[in-house]
Image: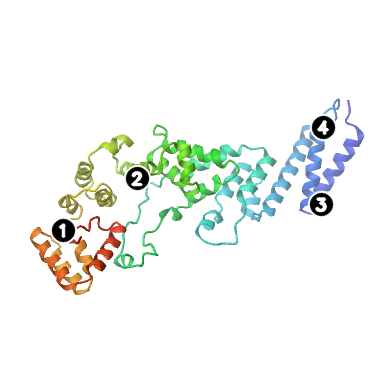
Amino acid sequence: MKIPESYTHATAALYYAVNYMPPGADQVEAAKECFSYINNLPEGTIDIDNDKRIKIENKYRKYTSKHILHTYGLGDDKYLNLVDYPEQLVRALYYDKTIPERYRCATKNRPDINSSVNDLGKVFNINLVKIRLELLEEWLQPDTGEIKNDSITVAGICQDDTSSSLIDTFTFDDNLLRACYIISCGDHEQFIGHLITMGLTEDFHCPGVRYRALRVVQSITDENTIQELSKINSSTMNEYLKSLQYLTDLQRLGIGYSISGFDSCSKEKLIQVLISNQYCCSRSLRLVPQLFIDYHIDNYELLLHTCPVVNKLKFFDIIHSCFRAQQPHFAAALLPFVEDTDKQLILNEISLNYHDIDSVIKKLKKIEKKRIVRQVSYLT
């Protein structure tokens, strides 16, 4: 059996056109038509030889993929040089620097990478769901060297309420921003369900991955949807996230807990472990005051052990320096760290010299809101 002459001539003509036409939509259309001819031969004809088929197929995919990249404003050499390696190309596109940038600031350079990848997936017939899930797994891994900057300066404390001195570290994590973007592709609900399952399943992922997965979901989904999919109300979810964050930090220190184990353990005993066993580790010492705040622990002597220099500080003198600087609310914030006999003297000085007690309390509550102090009951 022979291929009909009309098909032979048509295929040859299209292949010639593909090779000599300038790059652009017409060349892509010719390559597509040529590729269609060899894949739709009439019944009863023999196939053309395999070498020619491979050449035509490669031309079609090469020219079409390059045209797609140019169409979406992604025609850089670093991407064009990967058209023969489609999976590598998709991965490279999702590491494009414009993805995290678009979440941080207004920028004109916002190529639709999700759509370009969808189009490339059709050309190369590759499993995009598999690649996207693999990328999510990579991006959700916590950085083992990650240390949050929890320091807050006095200048930051004195800012107006309208401007927060606490920085959301989420926006500084390129991988989390990439995860948010990749989920916005067509399989949005499928990926959100996957992340929620990942975050709530204790057996298969470390606490850091679960925490980051749920943080991504929180950033792109409303509370009602999360509650509907997870069957957990928002307050319980926030407590769960807080526990996961602690488990992540403790795991870095070699201390392992399950969620239930951490929630039921004595936080005061955990603090003692952190102080005695991890004394020289800055990450450990950073956790201690956070545990005091989050779990309302009032053993301030234990807190002072995390910073031996505090025992040498003369708080009474520091408090009087606050008075001289006309900052009585800072003096009040230090009351838990002075002897009981001195507390009444300081309270008397505040009440005698600062008649606008409401203003002092308001400023004290302001720094309490920033989690510097927890109680303002001395003045109320």
Q: Are marks 4 and 2 in contact (CB under 8 Å)?
A: no
- Amino acid tagged 3: Met
Front label number (3 vs 1): 1
Q: Position of residue 287 (x, y in %)?
A: 28, 49
Q: Position of residue 227 (x, y in %)?
A: 45, 40
Q: Earlier in the sequence, mark 1 or mark 4?
A: 4
What residue is drawn where x is 85% and y is 30%? 42
Query: Mark 2 — residue?
Result: 242
| Apparent side of residue 230 relative to residue 325 in the rendered image (left or right) | right
Name the quadrant of the N terminus: top right
Front label number (4 vs 2): 2
- Amino acid tagged 4: Ile
The residue nearer to you, when weighing 231 against 157, is 231
Write down the quadrant of residue 346 in the picture. bottom left
Query: Mark 3 — residue?
Result: 21
What residue is drawn where x is 30% and y is 37%? 257
Query: Mark 1 — residue?
Result: 337
- Mark 1, Cα crowd under 10 Å, few <14 / some 14-19 / many 20+, is some
Q: Mark 1 to mark 4: distance in Å?
A: 88 Å
| Apparent side of residue 360 relative to residue 133 in the rendered image (left or right) | left
Front label number (1 vs 4): 1
Q: Mark 3 to mark 1: distance in Å?
A: 81 Å
Q: Are marks 3 and 4 in contact (CB under 8 Å)?
A: no
Name the secondary structure under disc 4.
Answer: loop
Q: Earlier in the sequence, mark 3 or mark 4?
A: 3
Name the secondary structure under disc 1.
Answer: helix
- Mark 3, Cα crowd under 10 Å, few <14 / some 14-19 / many 20+, is few
Query: Mark 4 — residue?
Result: 48
Q: Residue furthest right?
A: 5
The residue nearer to you, when weighing 68 against 181, is 181
Q: Earlier in the sequence, mark 4 or mark 2?
A: 4
